[in-house]
Structures are given as structure tokens and as C-alpha cells.
Image: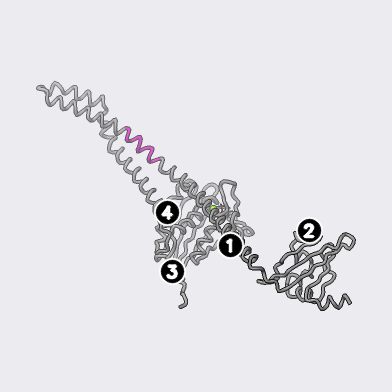
Amino acid sequence: MADKVLTRLEEGVLLHEADGRLIYANPAADALIRLHPVWTEMRGQLDQMIPVQAIADARAHPDWHGIVPFLPGRMLDARLYWLGPDAGRFLLLLKDGVRLRSDDEQALQLRHEELNVRFNAAQEQLLQSEKLASIGQLAAGVAHEINNPIGYVHSNLGSLQEYVGNLFALIDVYERAMRAHDPHAMRSEIDDTRERLDVDFISRDLPQLLTESRQGIERVTAIVRDLRDFSRSDREHAWRLADLHAGLDSTINIVWNELRYKATLEKDYGTLPMVECLQSELNQVFMNLLMNAGQAIDGEGVISVRTGHEAGQVWVEIGDTGSGIAPEMLQRIFDPFFTTKPVGKGTGLGLSISYGIVAKHHGRIEVESTPQTGSRFRVVLPVRQPHVVVAP
Ligand SMILES: Nc1ncnc2c1ncn2[C@@H]1O[C@H](COP(=O)(O)OP(=O)(O)O)[C@@H](O)[C@H]1O
Ligand SMILES: [Mg+2]
């Protein structure tokens, strides 16, 4: 009799052992299990059908009621009863065709959106922190580079002040000699003064000092110009046709402050058309690849930058004679936070961010690497972005 009722019931009725093994399912439950690939494969194992927390709840209370996801867009109303330590079993009732109450639905939707927003904010924060880290490195390099010329221009200005003072003093003596009725009598005073004030030395040193100061200022101007080029489209942040070589050069100039002590640069540029891109973001990619190349070199090595152009695509290749990457690591280097560098030196975000930027450009990054020999990262980009055709 009871058996007949169970067979006709539209509700799924299941009996599980304490360890979750399924020992009975009525036809309705059986049909549900067959619809669900994982449930089928796991033979209706309890913890595959119901959240683990629900099972613990049922044992403690001794029942649990909730809604469980079934198939995409389809939920089941579930009740789980713990039949007590004597029986040592679970009774599970499943009802199909649940419509979420619209309140629930709305709450779910809101929760979903909230999670999404939080996820995006977290991701944005990561991007910012990697950007800050690279800006920090950059700032240190730039400060170092500017410090030197500023230092000697400053000290040269000190000398210049003294020289000019001396020259005016000498002019004074000449003036007095001209006004004196007996200029010849002043001759020895002029000679004395010239000697005392080191005027011969000044006339040799002054042109040299001015040339050197001028070069120093030009160097500072160049660094500032590179920085401006590097960051320009950061402000504009727009897709435009850009000269990748110009971007590469200004990026190399900035990064080179740090790299030149260990690496020599080999440049082999092809001819490139103007490329539709977000230039400052691509500069960030080049910077990451160059920094990685430099950091991979222990002692001294070579960093090569090559470019080329073929059928609708351009490529920029940054190679190094550094440590190389073990084959089993190769598929992980683009993962966020994957780093083999000590804390403070590596964030593990450079390549994952670069990957994202290149993907946004509908391009790709290819890697070839041999341990102990070196690596080559090749960024391949379409010359023009595919334009979305909006259906009428
Ligand atoms: N040119 C390279 N040579 C050797 N290993 C590299 C090179 N570029 C990247 N890697 C490896 O990939 C990892 C991830 O790089 P990246 O995402 O830029 O993070 P980070 O440089 O902060 O470690 C590095 O820690 C390093 O192990
Ligand atoms: Mg890096």
C-alpha cells in the first residue's frame, strides 16, 4: 500500500544512509536524478544534491528546508529529515516546478549584482595597485636619472655665480684704470687682479661649464618628454592611430635607467603602419615585458626589441638572454599573482594585466622560452580593430 503511494507521488522521495549513500528513490526522484548529469554520475549521493551545510542542519534540528539549484533556471524545493540515530538515515523530499517568489527572486538578483560590483571593484583595485607598483618603480628610476644632471647643473650654477663675481670685479679694476690719468700705472694692479681672481682659469672653464649644464638640462627635458609621451593617452584614453615605435622608444628610455647596468639593448625595427590602439596601455605592456626581461637577467645580458608587419598584423617582440622559464611553469605565468620573485619585487600581475590589455586589442601574446638560455615574448596586434556592426 505505502509502496503504491510512493510510486504515484509526484514528489521525489529518497532515502539516504548516514554516509550519504542513496538506498531508495521513488520513480519521481529517479526521474529527477536522471535529468541531472552529476546526480546521475554520483548515483544520487546526498552531498551532491544538497548543500553540505543543509545536511549538518538537518542532523541538528532535525530537518532542513530550502531551495536547491537543479538545472539552469530550474530550482527544486527540498526538505531533508534526519530520522534519528536509531534509523541512522536521511529522508529527502524534492518538489519540482518551484517558482521563486518574486521577493526572493529580486533579493537573489540584487545579491548577484552586489557581488558583481564587489568583484569589479576588487579587480579595479588590483589593477590600480599594479599600476602604482610600476609607477613607483618608474618614479624611482626617473628620480635617479634626473638627480644626476640636476646635481651638476646646480653645482655649476654655484661656480658660475663666483666666476661672474670675479669678472665684474676685474671689470671694476679696468674701469678705474681707464678713468685714472695714468693707465700704465694701473697695469700691475690689473695683472694682480687677473691672477688673484683666476681669470685665465675662468675663461677656460666657463664655456665648458655652460656646455655641460646645457646638456644636463637637455637630458632632463628629454626624460620629462618621454614621461609625458608615456602617459599622454592615459589622460586621453582613447582609441587612436599610433606609432608603436614612438611608444616603444619612450618606454625603453624610461625603463632603461634601471636596465642599462645589466643589459645591452639590440633594436631591430621593421617598418610599421600606424596601429589602432590605446597607446598608453600598450606602453604598459611593453614596460612589463622589458622589466621582466631585465629581471630575468642575472649578471649581464642582452635585451632585444624587434618589430615587424605582416598581412593586417604587427608584432613587437621582446627577447632576453635571461633565466628562461621551465616548461611546466609556462602555462601559469599569465595567472594573476603567479610570481617567482621575492616579495616586494614581484606582484605576479604584470603578465596577467598585459594579457588583458592585448586581448582587449584583439591580439595575443606568444612566448618561447628555454631554461638557462632566455625567453621571447611576442605581442601580435591587428592593425585595425574589428568594428562591431550594429544590426539595423
Ligand atoms: N622574460 C622572462 N624570463 C623569465 N621568466 C619570466 C619572464 N617574464 C615572466 N617570467 C616569469 O613569469 C612570472 C610572472 O610575471 P609577471 O606577471 O610579470 O609578474 P612578476 O614580474 O611580478 O613576477 C615571473 O615571476 C617569472 O617567473
Ligand atoms: Mg613583471
Quarter of the rendered structure image containing ligand 1: bottom right
Mark 1: is the Cβ under 8 angstroms from ligand 1?
A: no
* Image quadrant where residue 383 sits: bottom left
Q: Secondary structure at mark 3?
A: loop
Identify the residue at the far left of this view. Answer: 181
Q: Which residue is mark 4?
A: 231
- Tell me: residue 158, above or below residue 286: above
Would residue 73 be found to the left or right of residue 46 on screen?
Answer: left
Residue type (three-letter) at the residue carrying disc 3: Arg
Q: Which residue is mark 2?
A: 56
The tally of labels here is 4
Q: Which residue is mark 3?
A: 384
Q: Name the spot of residue 185 as percent of width and height, x first.
A: 14, 21
Mark on residue 159?
none
Main secondary structure type of the part rendered in magenta: helix
Residue type (three-letter) at the residue carrying disc 1: Glu
Q: Secondary structure at mark 1?
A: helix
Colour convention of the picture: one colour
Would residue 156 be found to the left or right of residue 319 on screen?
Answer: left
State which tag comes first along the sequence, 2 or 4.
Answer: 2
Would residue 345 be found to the left or right of residue 240 on screen?
Answer: right
Using the numbered discs, state the Cα–Cα distance from disc 4 to disc 3 in whole angstroms.
22 Å
Q: Which residue is mark 1?
A: 113
CB within 8 Å, label 4 to label 3:
no
* Residue 271 seen in the current view: no
CB within 8 Å, label 1 to label 3:
no
Q: Which residues are magenta?
A: 148-158
